[in-house]
Amino acid sequence: MVRQIPVALDCPVPAPASRRPAVPLWASAALSLGPGVPAPGIGPARMTVTTSRPGEPGWLRDDSPSEKSGSLVTWEPRLAPSGPRDASMIVPLIKRDDRRADDAIVLPPESAILSDDLVGDLFIVYAFDLPGHFQYVMEHDRKTLGLDPGGLRKLSVANLTRLRSKPRVLQASRGAVRLTLDGNLEASLLLVDHLWPQLARGIAGETIVAVPARDCLVVSGTEIAGGVEALRQGVKRVWENPKTNPKLVLTRSLLVRRGGSWHVFEPA
């Protein structure tokens, strides 16, 4: 899909300055968020472990003595190397669709920015992960690299799990936990489909999330006492915080995981 991007959206996007080589493995995040199975904010929680075949997203043990930081394994994100852009450098960014007719610019077809709808007022923009910033993938890039527009989401998510290390699970509030990645792409974890069934195994009820900003992803469950309210309060704090970067805000809506995809959460 080709989308016209308003002037208000930032491009390129600043990325973290701190860099270390990324470990091309991810951890199974079977969180404990149900009755009798504690989690951060409810009790102790740890990552559990599964294995994968070569070439598939790997899962890293959290009890390796050489890789342990507290109770969870973390590494700084690695940015893509400088030089010519290629398909291996494309990652997904989540944006808020708040375009208005009076602030949108009409780009020539070759400069149109490639994107896909996600859910509600959110959409996905594809970007090259360059040293120090992101650069939108445009139609002329797609043609040069011979990319299939329908395959960009799958490609970008595969790159994300390769270029970024294991997400950390931190306490957000009682009944909710926060996933952290690199301070830029937390919301993009919504697109990592193999992550959410494993999270769901330790969550009471349906998995619900708040993504008030691109760097904020908070998780709870529909049957966790106070979970929905904790997410709503978290959204309110982010949106009303004067220090929040307005270019990073996403949505006030909560999302629920159903049938392998995200939907706007509407409590009964």
Image (cartoon, grey):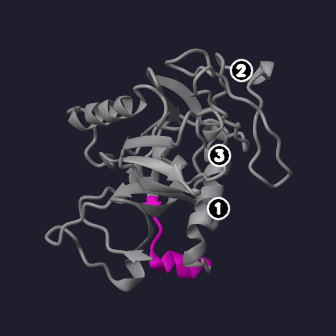
Q: Residue at x 41, y 83 (%)?
A: 110
Q: Magenta segment: does it hold 22?
A: no
Give whichever of 58, 251 is nearer the camera: 251
The residues tagged by marks 1 and 2 sit, at their Cα atoms, a distance apart of 29 Å
Q: Secondary structure at mark 1?
A: helix
Task: For the N terminus, give its image quadrant.
Answer: bottom left
Residue type of the residue flagged with mark 2: Lys
Q: Residue at x 20, y 33 (%)?
A: 242
1 vs 2, front mark: 2
How far across and down, in percent of the image, does residue 190 sit?
52, 50
Q: Residue at x 62, y 27 (%)?
A: 32
The residues tagged by marks 2 and 3 sit, at their Cα atoms, a distance apart of 25 Å
Q: Secondary structure at mark 2?
A: loop
Return the residue found at the far front: 268
Quadrant of residue 155 within the rendered picture? bottom right
Q: Is residue 31 left or right of residue 178?
A: right
Q: Residues within 10 Å of mark 1 (few under 14, many from 20)?
A: some
Q: Is residue 92 above or below residue 197?
A: below
Please report the bounds of the magenta region as a residue range: 135-145
The residues tagged by marks 3 and 1 sit, at their Cα atoms, a distance apart of 26 Å
> Mark 2 — residue?
68
Residue type of the residue flagged with mark 3: Pro
Q: Residue at x 41, y 77 (%)?
A: 2
Residue 197 numbered tag: 3
Q: Is residue 208 above or below residue 13?
A: above
How far across and down, in percent of the image, does residue 54 sit?
86, 52
Q: Residues within 10 Å of mark 2 (few under 14, many from 20)?
A: some
How far across and down, in percent of the image, does residue 92 sit?
51, 57
Secondary structure predominantly adopted by residues drawn in magenta: helix
Residue 88 numbered tag: 1
Q: Is residue 30 left or right of residue 5?
A: right
Are discs 2 and 3 less than 8 Å apart at CB? no
